[in-house]
Amino acid sequence: MMEIKVELAKELKEKPDMSNLPFGVYYTDHMFEMDYTAGIGWHDPRIVPYHKIEMEPASMIFHYGQSTFEGLKAYKDAEGHIRLFRPEQNFTRLNLSNDRLVIPNLDVDFCVEALKKLVEIEKDWIPTGEGTSLYVRPFCMATDVHVGVHPARTYKFMIILSPVGSYYKEGINPVKIYVEDEYCRAVKGGMGFAKTAGNYAASLIAQEKAEKLGYTQVLWLDGVEKKYIEEVGTMNIFFVIDGEIITPALNGSILGGITRKSAIELLKDNGYTVTERKISIQEVYEAYESGKLNEIFGTGTAAVISPVGELIWEDKHMVVNGGEIGPVSHLVYDTITGIQSGKVEDKYNWVTNVR
Ligand SMILES: *Cc1c(COP(=O)(O)O)cnc(C)c1O
């Protein structure tokens, strides 16, 4: 393995109020950085003080969006041990995204080691309050100075860290979701399964529209027929209909969430029937009309679980489970956050201990 150089900051930042953390505002004292050069490969891995990066205006990333990212969390348990939730899954997925965007692959084990080393240095930045964590953002970007369309020959890979509280101001309380029927996020053959900046750029207009109407997020339908459910802004989605748990099957345009995968595994383990298949918004509405729509919840690293209390589709309003969090959402939330924080036994071996 390449050796990671460490340069510690001479002065440390003042820590924010850890009991009242907004999402993604504060960054820690250090970051991880590594470069790629065609013909050489990834080189010069280093942990350095968090710093500004100087780039030329003609750098490719500013023009063609050749970039990928990940999001995961580090926690501190009651004994002060640092825990990472399935980090190898994130770096494996980063390579999947990189393949789609023609960005060179990273060594998954090396990235996990680099992250462990960085998080260890920043351990005092890991908040310990309920619902808080140290959010980890690894990302790759094209750095060639060339306004020409082709895959770059140079890249940067970085990891930055941010102490965070709840992703939604609602916390674990149910959110209101708007079913988007005009715009689409991704189509099969596009980049929907990859975690890349462009997918988010495509989503902002609908997100803004939903917010103006008083909703927290958008529920995306498939881009071709506008019939089948894909996912929610930054989350995968689950429906509990007549006791059965249904989530859209990964079809190329949906992001394969690690929280989604974990939720499926633990729900099956708890005796639930979980089906991954196509599900239309019409089917959800019919289930609602017949009183069989028990619960809806979203899954994603940032919010972990977000129950959906209300869904609006065209002129149809669906209030789910009386606008309250239901038992399945509760089970998934308690189990995953319990494993993450060390309060629930990690029988699936999902946690990587930093030391
Ligand atoms: C990251 C992300 C998710 C959730 O994935 P997790 O691995 O569970 O965090 C869902 N949808 C989109 C579009 C995402 O970018």
Image (spheres, rainbow, N blue to C red):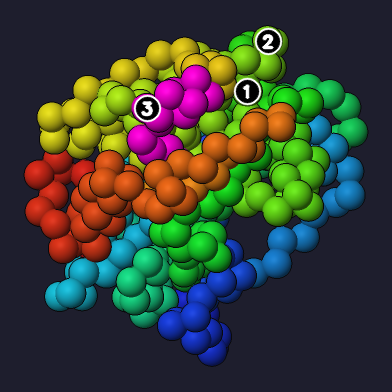
User: In which quadrant will I find the C terminus?
Assistant: bottom left
Which residue type does callout 2 highlight? Glu
Q: Residue at x 10, y 53 (%)?
A: 345
Q: Secondary structure at mark 3?
A: loop
Observer able to see residue 225? yes
Task: Give the class, few, some or many, for how many residues have Cα within 10 Å of label 1's Cα (few <14, many ≥20).
Answer: many
Which residue type does callout 3 highlight? Lys
Label 3 sits on residue: 292
Label 2 sits on residue: 225
What range of the chain is rendered magenta?
285-303
Label 1 sits on residue: 221
Is 292 magenta? The answer is yes
Residue 87 shown left or right of residue 265 in the figure: right
Above or below, 316 relative to 29:
above
- Front label number (3 vs 1): 3
Sequence-wise, the earlier of marks 3 and 2 is 2
Task: Give the class, few, some or many, for how many residues have Cα within 10 Å of label 2's Cα (few <14, many ≥20).
Answer: few
